[in-house]
Amino acid sequence: MSAMTPRRLLPALVLAAALAAAPALARPDRPAATAKITAKGVDGVRLGASYTSLRLAHKLAKAVRGCELAGPRARAAALRAPLHGFADLTQSRPRKVATIIVTGGAKARGVGVGGTFAQIKAAFPGTKLSHATDDMFGISVARVKTSAGGPISFAVSTKSHKVTEIGVPRLAFCE
């Protein structure tokens, strides 16, 4: 049996030191980049993109049955991390993204889930708040006009007055 000589031990020590220092080299003071929500999509999940291409790119999870009110062929797929939410798919084949609902992990011009209507107004001037869904769903809908960077819709809770969902191009209701 041969004992490890210092020369043979040196590369292993260098590797161990590098692995131990790796967390220290990460920048904890710099927050992770937040995904962007635009009128065309969210972090690579674009409206009109095929489900198959997004699934292969690991942007969407497996498609499951969608809203029962939309019919038996309705399908939806969950957004993959770091995003939270889902994408409604078209009923025709090939299936494509029709609507994207974000419940976390992305922001539209700095406004994300947990934001306020004042922040929405500051980021998207001219946005109107509709109270038509207050009694039925417990949310008000802030619709961003196309001229202001939309179409994007924000669901603002009537109780907490905070954004609970963001829909591109609109919010989808299934209750």
Image (spheres, helix red, strand yellow):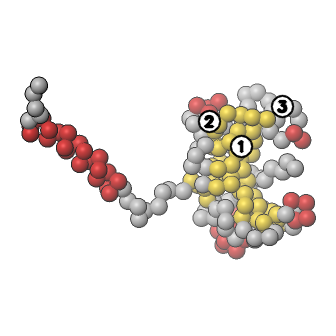
> In the rendered structure, which disc, 2 or 3, sits on the residue that comes first in sequence?
2
Q: Identify the element where label 1 is drawn.
A: strand
Locate residue 70: give its quadrant. top right
The residue drawn where x is 76% and y is 65% is: 156
The residue drawn where x is 8% and y is 35% is: 5
Q: Is residue 87 left or right of residue 54?
A: right
> In the rendered structure, which disc, 1 or 2, sits on the residue that comes first in sequence?
2
Assess whether mark 1 and mark 3 are in contact (beta carbons under 8 angstroms).
no
Q: Is residue 96 above or below residue 42?
A: above
Q: Is residue 79 left or right of residue 10?
A: right
The residue drawn where x is 25% and y is 44% is: 16
Instruction: Find residue 147 and report its horizontal and vertical position in percent.
Output: 71, 61
Assess whether mark 2 and mark 1 are in contact (beta carbons under 8 angstroms).
yes
For label 3, count other residues whose C-alpha is less than 10 Å away and answer few (under 14), some (14-19) or many (20+): few
Which sits in the foreground, 147 or 98? 98
Q: In the image, what residue type sits under mark 2? A: Leu
Give the number of callouts: 3
Q: In the image, what residue type sits under mark 1? A: Ala
Q: What's the mark number on residue 87?
A: 1
Instruction: Find residue 17 and report its horizontal and vertical position in percent.
Output: 23, 48
Q: Is residue 11 left or right of residue 103?
A: left
Mark yes or no: residue 26 visible. Answer: yes
* C-alpha span from label 1 to label 2: 11 Å
> In the rendered structure, which disc, 3 or 1, sits on the residue that comes first in sequence?
3
Location of mark 2 (residue)? 54
Q: Identify the element where label 3 is drawn.
A: loop
Mark yes or no: residue 124 visible. Answer: no
